[in-house]
Amino acid sequence: MNSYRYKNVLLIDDNHIDNLINRKILDNAHYAETITVIDSPEEAFEFVRNSLVTGNDVPEVIFLDLRMPIMNGFEFLRSLIELPNLKPDLIKIFVLSSSLDPKDIKRINENHLVSRFIGKPLTNQILEEI
């Protein structure tokens, strides 16, 4: 029987190929028992909101892309802050992005919900570090 580091992980990215690769890396590392992949931040927000309300499948870790249409990663984080039942230490959020824009990095570092910025691609070495 495999032991997993986490029960539930949420991967939010609008890029299908990145999702396939990142999910495979997470699976191979036995990182989580359940990996939920959602390609829309709006749907991901509803998923997190509902899981907090019901107490079911609350993600312990979220890997979040920044550059997405309609709602970007920063807007997703801003929406999360509005949730009354979200405790900042309840969910670890890792921004997983190819953006190296200094303004983005500064905003990430200033956001108390974000545990760390990870430059794409996700690797086994990075998973070990976090």
Image (spheres, grey):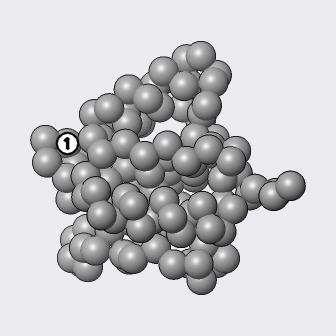
Asked whether residue 36 is in view, the answer is yes
Q: Where does the image place residue 74, in percent across and percent down from the top left?
A: 28, 51
**Residue in the picture at 39% in, 61% down:** 20
Could you tell me which residue is drawn at 60 percent across and 72 percent down?
Answer: 127
46 with respect to 103 (left or right): right
Numbered label tally: 1
Extreme left residue here? 70
Name the amino acid type tagged 1. Met
- Residue farthest to the top, as pictured: 54
Q: Residue furthest bottom?
A: 125
**Which of 103/29 is in front?**
29
Q: Considering the numbered disc 1 on the image, is that residue within a helix, a strand or a loop?
A: loop
Image point (25%, 73%), residue name = 99
User: Which quadrant would residue 4 be assigned to in this image?
Assistant: bottom right
The residue to which callout 1 is attached is 71
- Quadrant into which the C terminus falls: bottom right
Q: In this rendering, is residue 93 above or below 50?
A: below
Picture quadrant where residue 13 is located? bottom left
Q: Residue 56: horizontal and vertical position, in percent?
A: 63, 24
Q: Tell me, yes or no, if residue 111 can be seen here.
A: no
Residue at (51%, 78%) from the top-left corner?
Answer: 123
Q: Is residue 110 left or right of residue 56?
A: left
Foreground residue among 113 and 48: 48
